[in-house]
Image: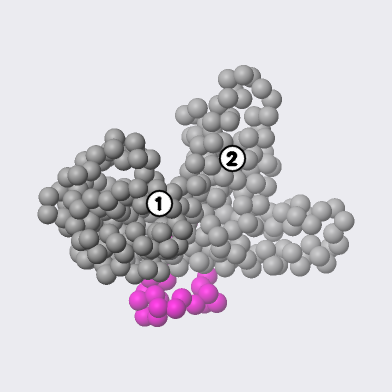
Amino acid sequence: MRFFIVDDDRAVRSILRQIIEDEDLGETAGEAEDGSQLEGHVLRLKQIDILFVDLLMPGRDGIETIRHLQGSFPGKIIMISQVEAKEMVAEAYSLGIEYYIHKPINRIEILNVIQKVKERIELERSIQDIQSSLSRLVNVGGGGRNVLKEKSIKETGEFLLSELGIVGANGSQDLLAILQYLFDNEQISLYEKNFPPLKQIFIKVAEQKLGSGASPVEINREIKASEQRVRRAIIHSLNHFASLGLTDFSNPKFESYASRFFDFTVISKKMKELQKDAAPALSSTRVNMKKFIQVLFLEAKRLNESAGKRI
């Protein structure tokens, strides 16, 4: 990954550069002390993947800089600032930044944020590669179109799990297997109206995982274990969005995903719990597992079809 740092504080630039180099996260390809020194075409020529931008700078501030770069810089932007005003944070997110980090710089937070942004970049590139391969097959009229589409539903699922904050969580692989099963077995009657029972989904996925030689006892054990892993992953996603909502209720990801994947009353209750206790309890949380899985499938299918239309 290639980074560019824009901050009028030399010490902050030095700290960020040192973290990137010490942790072998990539290369710091450039620095600037003001947003007025930044142009989208220059960042593209430098092949910048991730741009750090300070909010308050003397010449062109962070918000103005992001506006100036819109449409000319395709990379990801992480904003850093001492300002905690919710209105400014919300405006930054509305302009397309990935994360907003408060100063003073916290090494662990920086590492976590960079890792998440890197994962998202890698997933997006993987999806683009799949789309490019599919386009070439369509152009030559080749066979194999279904294979690529099957693979792309997994890539799309990984992208969504990243958006939901659980791409690496225990249970994410179970959700991807469920997604693949639903995609492979969708019938003429749409799942929107006749979604299969959860029990059937878990049975079929367990049978596929263990193979035809598995005994009923082994299958039943795998079903229970898979249900538990999936439930925990969904709860982690709920905690992720509840925390996001507490930090910034107008966060675009919170607005886009929270109400679709979870009931509003559940989100509201979890936010109140987090306000009282920083350590979220898994055992007391009830989630609608079927709704989550159904929305995950429909959203992955929609994104997949949308990608196909753009080819």
Residue bounds of the magenta highlight:
259-286
Give the number of the mark in front: 2 or 1: 1
> What's the mark number on residue 152?
2
Using residue 15 as the reference point, say whether residue 293 is left or right of it.
Answer: right
Name the residue carrying label 1.
Answer: 27
Specify whether residue 308 is painted magenta. Answer: no
Residue 288 in view in this figure: no
67 or 149: nearer the eye? 67
Badge count: 2
Residue found 67% across the figure and 38% down from its top = 187
Q: Position of residue 205 (x, y in %)?
A: 72, 54
Q: Position of residue 239 (x, y in %)?
A: 45, 68
Residue found 28% across the figure and 56% down from its top = 79
Amino acid, disc 2: Ser
How crowded pointer 1 is (Cα within 10 Å; few <14, some 14-19, many 20+) is rated as some
> What's the mark number on residue 213?
none
- The colour mode here is one colour
71 or 247: nearer the eye? 71
Secondary structure beneath label 1 = strand
Amino acid, disc 1: Glu
245 or 131: nearer the eye? 131
Using residue 154 as the reference point, say whether residue 211 is left or right of it.
Answer: right
Rounded to the nearest angstrom, the CA distance separating label 2 from label 1 is 30 Å
**In the image, farthest residue toward the top:** 140
Residue 245 in view in this figure: yes
Q: 301 above or below 178?
A: above
The answer to whether marks 2 and 1 mark residues whose Cβ atoms lie closer than 8 Å is no
